[in-house]
Amino acid sequence: MLAKISVFPIDKGESVGNYVAKVIDYIIRESDKAGVRYEITSMGTLIEGETEDVWRLLKGSHEVMRKYSNRVYITIEIDDRRGKTDAIT
């Protein structure tokens, strides 16, 4: 499964980079533990791996941001193509 996630608080003003960095740190740490591939971009983070691992990282990303914000905005795009791997180049 390939997913792209963007997560940010909408109750913390204009400068939210410190909050977003906490989610990115979580994705890096947990992806490395699970052997999941990721790519950080300016508009979101790509995550590629087994379905269960990707869903766990998406849910965990939300939970990380909820620790710091009462209102969280998330966009998620998913491409779930059976038998396809290495979509992140």
Image (tube, grey):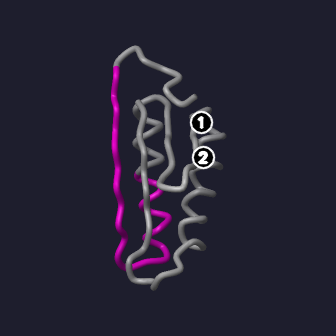
Q: Which amino acid does the dot numbered 1 rest on? A: Ala
Q: What label does residue 30 carry, if any?
A: 2
* Residue at image point 48% right, 20% down: 85
Of residues 24 and 33, which is closer to you in this image?
A: 24
Q: What label does residue 34 carry, if any?
A: 1
* Residue at image point 45% right, 85% down: 13
| Magenta residue check for 31 | no
Location of residue 14 in the rendering, given as x and y in whole percent from the top left corner: 47, 82
Left or right: where does residue 25 sit relative to residue 66? right
Location of residue 23 in the rendering, given as x and y in whole percent from the top left corner: 54, 60
* Residue at image point 35% right, 76% down: 71
Location of residue 77 in the rendering, given as x and y in whole percent from the top left corner: 34, 44
Per the rendered image, the range of residues in magenta is 59-81
Residue found farthest to the front: 42
Left or right: where does residue 16 sit relative to residue 25? left
Tell me where residue 32 sits by quadrant: top right
C-beta proximity under 8 Å, tags 1 and 2 = yes
Separation (CA) of disc 1 from disc 2: 6 Å
Left or right: where does residue 52 sit relative to residue 41? left
Above-or-below relation of 35 to 64? above
Name the secondary structure under disc 2: helix
